C-alpha cells in the first residue's frame, strides 16, 4: 500500500466514524425528545389551576407536544413558562 492509499483509507475511516457518531447523536436526541413528550403528556392530566401554579397553560402544553419530532418539547415549555 502506498502512502497515498494508506492516507486515503484513514480518511475514509475517519469520515465513517464521524458519520456513525453523528447518527448515534441524532438517534439519542430523538429518543430523549420522545421520552420528554411522554413525560410532558402527564401535564395534561393536571387541572388548569395546577398548571397555572407552575407557570403554564393547557395551550402551552398542547403547543409543546405538537412541535415537530426533532424539537424538544421540554425546551419549548421552559421558554414559555411564566
Image (cartoon, rainbow, N blue to C red):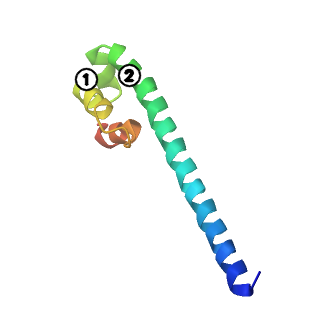
Q: Residues within 10 Å of mark 1 (few under 14, many from 20)?
A: some
Give the numbered dot on residue 41. Answer: 2
Task: Residue at 35%, 27% (x, y): give it.
Answer: 54
Q: Nearer the viewer, residue 8 or 1?
A: 1
For residue 3, which quarter of the picture? Answer: bottom right
Query: Based on the displayed image, in which of its 4 quarters is residue 60 positioned?
Result: top left
Indicate left or right for 33 with 7 as reference.
Answer: left
Residue at the image point whose x is 53% and y is 51% from the top: 23
Q: Quadrant of the C terminus?
A: top left
Q: Residues within 10 Å of mark 2 (few under 14, many from 20)?
A: some
Q: Nearer the viewer, residue 59 or 81?
A: 59
Relative height, residue 6 to residue 21 (above, below): below
Residue at the image point whose x is 54% and y is 42% from the top: 28
Position in image of residue 4 (x %, y %): 68, 85
Earlier along the polypeptide chain: callout 2 or callout 1?
A: 2
Mark 2 vs 1: CB contact within 8 A: no
Where 75 falls versus 55 (above or below)? below
- Provide residue 30's location: percent of width, then percent of height: 47, 40
For discs 2 and 1, the disc positioned in front in the rendered view: 2
Horizontal relation, residue 58 to residue 69: left or right: left
Q: Secondary structure at mark 2?
A: helix
As drawn, the residue found furthest toward the front would be 1
The span from disc 2 to disc 1 (Cα, nearest Å) is 11 Å
Is residue 57 placed above or below 78 in the rendered structure? above
Q: Which residue is mark 1?
A: 58
Residue at (66% x, 66% y) in the render: 13
As drawn, 29 above or below 34: below
- Report whether 25 appears left or right of 54: right
Along the viewing direction, whichever of 4 and 54 lies nearer the viewer: 4
Location of the N terminus by quadrant is bottom right
- The spot of residue 70 in percent (x, y) is 38, 43
Amino acid at each position: 500500500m502506498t502512502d497515498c492509499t494508506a492516507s486515503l483509507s484513514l480518511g475514509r475511516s475517519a469520515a465513517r466514524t464521524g458519520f456513525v457518531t453523528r447518527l448515534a447523536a441524532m438517534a439519542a436526541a430523538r429518543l430523549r425528545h420522545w421520552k420528554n413528550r411522554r413525560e410532558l403528556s402527564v401535564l395534561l392530566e393536571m387541572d388548569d389551576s395546577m398548571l397555572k401554579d407552575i407557570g403554564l397553560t393547557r395551550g402551552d402544553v398542547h403547543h409543546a407536544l405538537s412541535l415537530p419530532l426533532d424539537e424538544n418539547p421540554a425546551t419549548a415549555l421552559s421558554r414559555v413558562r411564566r
